[in-house]
Image (tube, rainbow, N blue to C red):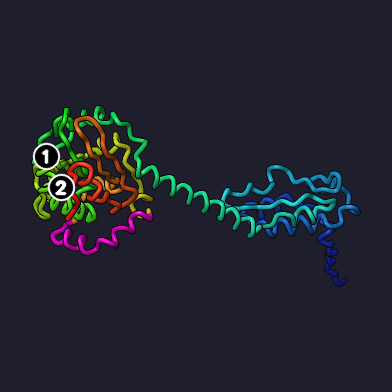
Amino acid sequence: MVKTKKMKKEIPASQKPLNNGKLKRLKKKKNHHRYLRYVRECSSSSSTRDPMAMASSVSSGILRIPRSLSLSPPKPSSQLVVLPSSSSFSAAATSFVRSSSTAASVRSREFACQSRMVRSRVVARASASDISPDISNALGDVRIFTASGQPVMFKDLWDQNEGMAVVALLRHFGCPCCWELALALKESKAKFDSAGVKLIAVGVGTPDKARILAERLPFPMDCLYADPDRKSYDILGLYYGIGRTFFNPASAKVFSRLDALQKAVKNYTIEATPNDRSSVLQQGGMFVFKGKQLLYARKDEGTGDHTPLDDILDICCKVPVS
């Protein structure tokens, strides 16, 4: 007697009970399209099915999926629009759609907000209103080092009663743009001296790194100081970070000074870069003091965003740059 193989009756997808195991697998694989399609197929004829056979209950014509199987909430960068649910789950499932127009409008609003922030930073940079006029009291107690390695207090660098001082804080001794600024300061030193103004250049790094710049540029060692711990930078609130160092629009100014930059780095060496590589993310600034009074303050917005020496000489020397 020949045994005949029983054929399994094919059950339409609309009459199959929901398979929680399959739902979990689809969700684990983050295959949301197949997940929704499977649920939609199983619920398309819910009016003719036994609701007890479903893993998830149907109430008021809307399929309620258990919280453990629900879709993960969208990330902040993704804009999902959920349309009002209808009497059928099919309409509710297909309501999760990405709206490109919504995402575009959000990006437009973010760009406008960033533009306003850039404009506000430019105003703050020009006025340096966030720096206290009494900052010299806190700055005076900071210990830095001469290029020869001797410790010195900031308040001992110039006469704290009536002395005039220009304090230029370089980024670090291995920054080519800072070599350019140091060269410009050296070329203007005669004007500072004739006006009785003390020139002070401070850089991030150890004294041996400062000596490399002083010897190779060259730069007068009696005007050069090292702040390896960036204490003076922190007190003055100078900018720090990857964005400021590499991606700030203000850094594009250096392209207008390529000739001066090329001249300054003729004897440049990367050996002047601080051993602590995180120091290269520090930005500099320029300050003018008369005694303890702060006359001028400007923070560099980005790498190479140096203070125009015309402004400095006009304040402390009243002599235009030749």
The residue nearer to you, when weighing 196 against 212, is 196
**Quadrant location of residue 125?**
top left
Q: How crowded is mark 2: few (under 14 residues within 10 Å), some or many (20 or more)?
A: many
Q: Earlier in the sequence, mark 2 or mark 1?
A: 1
Q: Quadrant of residue 159?
A: top left
Write down the quadrant of residue 149 in the picture. Answer: top left
**Residue matched to label 2:** 209
Spot occupied by residue 229 in the image (x, y as percentages of width and height): 24, 38
The region drawn magenta spans 249-269
Horizontally, residue 51 falls left or right of residue 257, namely: right
Quarter holding the N terminus? bottom right
Residue that appears at 24% across and 27% down: 137
The furthest residue to the bottom: 2
Quadrant showing the C terminus: bottom left
Question: Label 1 belongs to which residue?
Answer: 196
- The vertical placement of 101 against 120, above or below, is below
Q: Residue at x 36, y 37 (%)?
A: 129
Q: Residue at x 78, y 45 (%)?
A: 64
**Magenta run includes residue 30:** no
Name the residue type under label 1.
Gly
Q: In this view, does 26 lie above or below 205?
A: below
Please name which of the two marks, 2 or 1, marks the residue nearer to the observer. Answer: 1
